[in-house]
Amino acid sequence: MAAQKIIIDTDPGQDDAVAILLALASPEDIEVLGITAVAGNVPLELTQKNARIVCELAGRTDIPVFAGCDRPMNRPLVTAEHVHGKTGLDGPTLPDPQMPLQDRHAVDFIIDTLRAEPEGTVTLCPLGPLTNIATALRKAPDIAARIRRIVLMGGAYFEVGNITPAAEFNIYVDPEAADVVFRSGIELVVMPLDVTHRALVTGPRNAAIRAIGTPVAEAVADMTDFFERFDKAKYGSDGAPLHDPCVTAWLIAPDLFTGRHINVEIETTSPLTLGMTVADWWGVTDRPKNATFIGDLDSDRFFALLTERLARL
Ligand code: RIB
Ligand code: CA
Protein backbone atom coordinates (compact mmCIF):
# COMPACT_ATOMS: atom_id res chain seq x y z
CA MET A 1 0.00 0.00 0.00
CA ALA A 2 1.33 3.51 -0.82
CA ALA A 3 2.47 5.64 2.09
CA GLN A 4 -0.38 7.66 3.66
CA LYS A 5 -0.09 11.39 3.05
CA ILE A 6 -0.54 13.27 6.33
CA ILE A 7 -0.32 16.72 7.86
CA ILE A 8 0.71 16.67 11.54
CA ASP A 9 -0.87 19.49 13.56
CA THR A 10 0.96 19.72 16.85
CA ASP A 11 1.86 21.53 20.10
CA PRO A 12 5.24 19.94 21.00
CA GLY A 13 5.33 18.69 23.83
CA GLN A 14 7.55 15.68 24.46
CA ASP A 15 4.88 13.18 23.41
CA ASP A 16 4.19 15.17 20.23
CA ALA A 17 7.92 14.95 19.50
CA VAL A 18 7.89 11.15 19.75
CA ALA A 19 4.83 10.99 17.51
CA ILE A 20 6.58 13.12 14.88
CA LEU A 21 9.76 11.03 15.12
CA LEU A 22 7.75 7.81 14.69
CA ALA A 23 6.11 9.24 11.56
CA LEU A 24 9.42 10.42 10.09
CA ALA A 25 10.97 7.01 10.81
CA SER A 26 8.26 5.25 8.80
CA PRO A 27 8.47 6.46 5.17
CA GLU A 28 7.02 3.21 3.83
CA ASP A 29 3.82 3.91 5.81
CA ILE A 30 3.65 7.68 6.16
CA GLU A 31 4.50 10.67 3.95
CA VAL A 32 4.55 13.84 6.06
CA LEU A 33 3.46 16.69 3.76
CA GLY A 34 4.05 19.28 6.46
CA ILE A 35 3.88 20.05 10.16
CA THR A 36 1.59 22.81 11.45
CA ALA A 37 2.14 24.20 14.93
CA VAL A 38 -0.64 25.36 17.23
CA ALA A 39 -0.67 26.97 20.67
CA GLY A 40 -1.30 24.39 23.37
CA ASN A 41 1.21 22.79 25.73
CA VAL A 42 3.25 25.99 25.43
CA PRO A 43 2.68 29.21 23.45
CA LEU A 44 2.90 29.18 19.64
CA GLU A 45 6.36 30.73 19.43
CA LEU A 46 7.65 27.69 21.31
CA THR A 47 5.55 25.01 19.60
CA GLN A 48 6.65 26.17 16.15
CA LYS A 49 10.28 26.26 17.36
CA ASN A 50 9.98 22.82 18.96
CA ALA A 51 8.49 21.33 15.79
CA ARG A 52 11.57 22.50 13.90
CA ILE A 53 13.89 21.18 16.63
CA VAL A 54 12.31 17.74 16.25
CA CYS A 55 12.62 17.78 12.44
CA GLU A 56 16.32 18.65 12.78
CA LEU A 57 16.78 15.91 15.41
CA ALA A 58 15.37 13.46 12.83
CA GLY A 59 17.61 14.89 10.08
CA ARG A 60 14.53 16.01 8.15
CA THR A 61 14.99 19.72 7.51
CA ASP A 62 13.09 19.15 4.23
CA ILE A 63 9.79 18.98 6.14
CA PRO A 64 8.02 22.37 5.95
CA VAL A 65 6.93 23.71 9.35
CA PHE A 66 4.21 26.35 9.64
CA ALA A 67 2.97 28.46 12.55
CA GLY A 68 -0.79 28.51 13.05
CA CYS A 69 -3.20 29.93 15.60
CA ASP A 70 -1.72 31.42 18.75
CA ARG A 71 -4.89 31.13 20.82
CA PRO A 72 -8.18 29.21 20.87
CA MET A 73 -11.10 30.38 18.73
CA ASN A 74 -13.18 31.96 21.48
CA ARG A 75 -11.27 31.90 24.73
CA PRO A 76 -7.88 32.62 26.29
CA LEU A 77 -5.06 30.08 25.91
CA VAL A 78 -4.41 27.56 28.68
CA THR A 79 -0.93 26.00 28.59
CA ALA A 80 0.69 23.01 30.35
CA GLU A 81 4.20 24.01 31.39
CA HIS A 82 3.54 22.09 34.62
CA VAL A 83 3.63 18.93 32.52
CA HIS A 84 6.06 19.70 29.70
CA GLY A 85 8.38 22.27 31.32
CA LYS A 86 8.99 25.90 30.37
CA THR A 87 10.29 25.12 26.88
CA GLY A 88 7.73 22.42 26.15
CA LEU A 89 10.57 20.01 25.38
CA ASP A 90 12.32 19.90 28.76
CA GLY A 91 14.53 16.87 29.36
CA PRO A 92 17.22 16.74 26.66
CA THR A 93 19.45 19.65 25.70
CA LEU A 94 18.69 20.28 22.04
CA PRO A 95 20.12 23.06 19.83
CA ASP A 96 17.97 25.93 18.59
CA PRO A 97 16.67 25.19 15.07
CA GLN A 98 18.50 26.46 12.00
CA MET A 99 15.80 25.43 9.50
CA PRO A 100 13.40 28.25 8.61
CA LEU A 101 9.78 28.57 9.63
CA GLN A 102 7.55 28.80 6.55
CA ASP A 103 6.00 32.21 5.87
CA ARG A 104 2.53 30.87 5.05
CA HIS A 105 0.05 30.57 7.92
CA ALA A 106 -0.58 26.96 8.94
CA VAL A 107 -4.29 27.27 8.25
CA ASP A 108 -3.59 28.36 4.67
CA PHE A 109 -1.11 25.49 4.22
CA ILE A 110 -3.79 23.02 5.35
CA ILE A 111 -6.37 24.53 2.96
CA ASP A 112 -3.97 24.83 0.01
CA THR A 113 -2.66 21.27 0.46
CA LEU A 114 -6.13 19.73 0.67
CA ARG A 115 -7.18 21.60 -2.48
CA ALA A 116 -4.00 20.63 -4.34
CA GLU A 117 -3.84 16.92 -3.43
CA PRO A 118 -6.33 14.46 -4.98
CA GLU A 119 -9.60 14.34 -3.03
CA GLY A 120 -9.64 11.83 -0.18
CA THR A 121 -5.89 11.25 -0.08
CA VAL A 122 -4.72 13.43 2.84
CA THR A 123 -5.14 12.48 6.52
CA LEU A 124 -4.99 15.19 9.20
CA CYS A 125 -3.26 14.17 12.45
CA PRO A 126 -3.97 16.74 15.19
CA LEU A 127 -1.93 16.16 18.35
CA GLY A 128 -2.96 19.32 20.24
CA PRO A 129 -5.92 21.68 20.51
CA LEU A 130 -8.02 21.62 17.32
CA THR A 131 -7.84 25.37 16.67
CA ASN A 132 -5.96 25.18 13.33
CA ILE A 133 -8.20 22.41 12.00
CA ALA A 134 -11.47 24.11 12.94
CA THR A 135 -10.26 27.48 11.63
CA ALA A 136 -9.38 25.86 8.28
CA LEU A 137 -12.81 24.19 8.09
CA ARG A 138 -14.53 27.50 8.88
CA LYS A 139 -12.41 29.46 6.35
CA ALA A 140 -12.75 26.87 3.56
CA PRO A 141 -15.78 24.59 4.06
CA ASP A 142 -15.01 22.91 0.72
CA ILE A 143 -12.01 21.10 2.23
CA ALA A 144 -14.16 18.91 4.51
CA ALA A 145 -15.10 16.60 1.64
CA ARG A 146 -11.47 16.43 0.53
CA ILE A 147 -10.05 15.13 3.85
CA ARG A 148 -9.47 11.36 3.90
CA ARG A 149 -9.93 11.26 7.69
CA ILE A 150 -8.80 12.90 10.90
CA VAL A 151 -6.83 10.78 13.38
CA LEU A 152 -6.47 12.80 16.57
CA MET A 153 -5.32 12.57 20.15
CA GLY A 154 -7.90 14.03 22.49
CA GLY A 155 -10.75 13.40 24.87
CA ALA A 156 -11.45 10.91 27.59
CA TYR A 157 -14.40 8.90 28.82
CA PHE A 158 -13.79 6.05 31.28
CA GLU A 159 -10.43 7.61 32.13
CA VAL A 160 -12.06 11.03 32.85
CA GLY A 161 -10.10 14.27 32.58
CA ASN A 162 -6.47 15.27 33.09
CA ILE A 163 -6.81 19.07 33.14
CA THR A 164 -10.20 19.16 34.89
CA PRO A 165 -12.17 16.30 36.45
CA ALA A 166 -14.17 16.08 33.20
CA ALA A 167 -11.91 17.14 30.33
CA GLU A 168 -8.71 16.14 28.57
CA PHE A 169 -6.27 18.99 27.78
CA ASN A 170 -6.45 19.17 23.94
CA ILE A 171 -10.24 19.35 23.92
CA TYR A 172 -10.45 21.56 27.02
CA VAL A 173 -8.14 24.25 25.57
CA ASP A 174 -10.43 24.81 22.57
CA PRO A 175 -13.80 23.10 23.01
CA GLU A 176 -15.45 25.20 20.29
CA ALA A 177 -12.82 24.03 17.80
CA ALA A 178 -13.35 20.44 18.90
CA ASP A 179 -17.10 20.87 18.42
CA VAL A 180 -16.54 22.04 14.83
CA VAL A 181 -14.39 18.98 14.11
CA PHE A 182 -16.69 16.44 15.82
CA ARG A 183 -19.75 17.85 14.00
CA SER A 184 -17.96 18.05 10.62
CA GLY A 185 -19.04 14.65 9.31
CA ILE A 186 -15.42 13.85 8.48
CA GLU A 187 -14.29 10.31 9.40
CA LEU A 188 -12.73 10.58 12.87
CA VAL A 189 -10.42 8.20 14.71
CA VAL A 190 -10.01 9.39 18.31
CA MET A 191 -7.20 8.43 20.71
CA PRO A 192 -8.52 9.43 24.16
CA LEU A 193 -6.81 9.06 27.52
CA ASP A 194 -8.67 5.74 27.79
CA VAL A 195 -6.08 4.22 25.44
CA THR A 196 -3.11 6.57 25.85
CA HIS A 197 -2.92 5.91 29.59
CA ARG A 198 -2.22 2.28 28.65
CA ALA A 199 0.79 3.28 26.52
CA LEU A 200 3.10 3.79 29.50
CA VAL A 201 6.85 4.17 29.06
CA THR A 202 7.87 1.92 31.94
CA GLY A 203 11.49 1.76 33.12
CA PRO A 204 12.37 -1.30 31.00
CA ARG A 205 10.70 0.22 27.93
CA ASN A 206 12.61 3.49 28.33
CA ALA A 207 15.82 1.55 28.92
CA ALA A 208 15.24 -0.33 25.65
CA ILE A 209 14.86 2.98 23.83
CA ARG A 210 17.97 4.43 25.48
CA ALA A 211 19.90 1.24 24.62
CA ILE A 212 19.49 2.04 20.91
CA GLY A 213 22.35 4.42 21.61
CA THR A 214 21.66 7.05 18.94
CA PRO A 215 21.22 10.80 19.57
CA VAL A 216 17.52 10.47 18.70
CA ALA A 217 17.03 7.60 21.16
CA GLU A 218 18.98 9.46 23.85
CA ALA A 219 16.78 12.54 23.37
CA VAL A 220 13.56 10.51 23.47
CA ALA A 221 14.65 8.72 26.66
CA ASP A 222 15.53 12.06 28.26
CA MET A 223 12.17 13.51 27.17
CA THR A 224 10.18 10.66 28.71
CA ASP A 225 12.29 10.75 31.88
CA PHE A 226 11.18 14.37 32.28
CA PHE A 227 7.63 13.94 30.99
CA GLU A 228 6.74 11.07 33.36
CA ARG A 229 7.01 13.17 36.54
CA PHE A 230 3.52 14.66 36.23
CA ASP A 231 1.68 11.39 35.59
CA LYS A 232 3.65 9.41 38.14
CA ALA A 233 2.84 12.00 40.81
CA LYS A 234 -0.82 12.38 39.78
CA TYR A 235 -1.80 8.83 38.84
CA GLY A 236 0.97 6.80 40.44
CA SER A 237 1.45 5.41 36.94
CA ASP A 238 4.41 3.26 36.02
CA GLY A 239 5.85 5.72 33.49
CA ALA A 240 4.89 8.48 31.06
CA PRO A 241 1.77 7.91 28.93
CA LEU A 242 2.74 8.29 25.27
CA HIS A 243 -0.45 10.07 24.20
CA ASP A 244 0.37 11.42 20.73
CA PRO A 245 2.44 8.49 19.36
CA CYS A 246 -0.79 6.46 19.51
CA VAL A 247 -1.93 8.54 16.50
CA THR A 248 1.05 7.75 14.28
CA ALA A 249 1.22 4.13 15.50
CA TRP A 250 -2.44 3.68 14.48
CA LEU A 251 -1.58 4.82 10.94
CA ILE A 252 1.20 2.21 10.79
CA ALA A 253 -0.49 -0.68 12.62
CA PRO A 254 -4.19 -0.11 13.32
CA ASP A 255 -4.53 -3.72 14.47
CA LEU A 256 -2.66 -2.80 17.64
CA PHE A 257 -5.75 -0.84 18.73
CA THR A 258 -9.37 -1.64 19.55
CA GLY A 259 -12.33 0.72 19.84
CA ARG A 260 -15.94 1.35 18.90
CA HIS A 261 -17.67 3.51 16.29
CA ILE A 262 -19.92 5.65 18.46
CA ASN A 263 -21.38 9.11 18.99
CA VAL A 264 -19.03 11.59 20.66
CA GLU A 265 -20.10 15.14 21.40
CA ILE A 266 -18.28 18.04 23.07
CA GLU A 267 -19.45 20.05 26.07
CA THR A 268 -19.00 23.73 25.15
CA THR A 269 -21.12 25.58 27.73
CA SER A 270 -21.12 24.07 31.26
CA PRO A 271 -18.28 25.53 33.36
CA LEU A 272 -18.27 22.26 35.32
CA THR A 273 -17.77 19.91 32.37
CA LEU A 274 -16.39 22.24 29.67
CA GLY A 275 -14.41 20.27 27.08
CA MET A 276 -15.75 16.88 28.11
CA THR A 277 -16.03 14.32 25.30
CA VAL A 278 -19.43 12.78 25.96
CA ALA A 279 -18.93 9.34 24.43
CA ASP A 280 -22.01 7.15 23.93
CA TRP A 281 -19.92 3.98 24.44
CA TRP A 282 -22.97 1.87 25.40
CA GLY A 283 -25.20 3.16 22.61
CA VAL A 284 -27.90 4.51 24.93
CA THR A 285 -28.88 7.28 22.50
CA ASP A 286 -29.74 7.40 18.81
CA ARG A 287 -27.25 10.22 18.21
CA PRO A 288 -25.33 9.78 14.94
CA LYS A 289 -22.15 7.72 15.21
CA ASN A 290 -19.37 10.15 14.24
CA ALA A 291 -16.13 8.73 15.67
CA THR A 292 -14.11 5.57 16.15
CA PHE A 293 -13.25 5.98 19.83
CA ILE A 294 -10.22 3.87 20.75
CA GLY A 295 -10.27 2.16 24.15
CA ASP A 296 -7.27 -0.19 24.25
CA LEU A 297 -4.00 -1.24 22.61
CA ASP A 298 -1.46 -4.04 22.68
CA SER A 299 1.16 -2.01 24.57
CA ASP A 300 3.99 -4.53 24.20
CA ARG A 301 3.61 -4.58 20.42
CA PHE A 302 3.22 -0.77 20.42
CA PHE A 303 6.57 -0.30 22.17
CA ALA A 304 8.26 -2.95 20.03
CA LEU A 305 7.15 -1.01 16.94
CA LEU A 306 8.19 2.35 18.41
CA THR A 307 11.63 1.07 19.48
CA GLU A 308 12.27 -0.61 16.12
CA ARG A 309 11.29 2.52 14.18
CA LEU A 310 13.20 4.99 16.39
CA ALA A 311 16.34 2.90 15.82
CA ARG A 312 16.11 3.83 12.14
CA LEU A 313 16.74 7.55 12.78
O1 RIB B 1 -3.85 15.43 27.24
C1 RIB B 1 -2.72 14.99 26.53
C2 RIB B 1 -2.51 15.84 25.31
O2 RIB B 1 -2.31 17.20 25.70
C3 RIB B 1 -1.25 15.45 24.51
O3 RIB B 1 -1.44 15.74 23.15
C4 RIB B 1 -0.21 16.35 25.08
O4 RIB B 1 0.86 16.61 24.17
C5 RIB B 1 -1.01 17.60 25.30
O5 RIB B 1 -1.09 18.30 24.06
CA1 CA C 1 0.13 17.27 22.01
Image: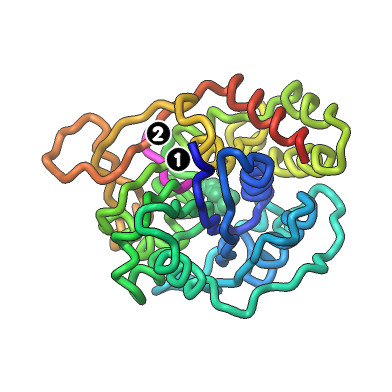
Report the disc number at residue 191. 1
- Give the side of residue 70 with respect to residue 267, left or right: right
Front-most of 90 and 134? 134
Name the quadrant containing residue 80: bottom right
- Which residue is located at x 53 percent, y 35 percent? 252
Q: Which residue is mark 2?
A: 294
Circles 2 and 1, Cβ within 8 Å, touching? The answer is yes
Quarter of the picture holding the C terminus:
top right
Q: Which residues are magenta?
A: 152-158
- Which residue is located at x 49 percent, y 54 percent? 126
Front-most of 119 and 247? 119
Q: Position of residue 293 (x, y in %)?
A: 35, 37
Q: Position of residue 72 (x, y in %)?
A: 46, 70
Front-most of 273 and 155? 155
Mark-to-mark CA distance, 2 and 1: 5 Å
Label 2 SS: strand
User: Magenta segment: does it hold 119?
Assistant: no
| Mark with earlier residue (2, 1) | 1
Name the quadrant containing residue 82: bottom right
- Which residue is located at x 29 percent, y 62 percent? 269
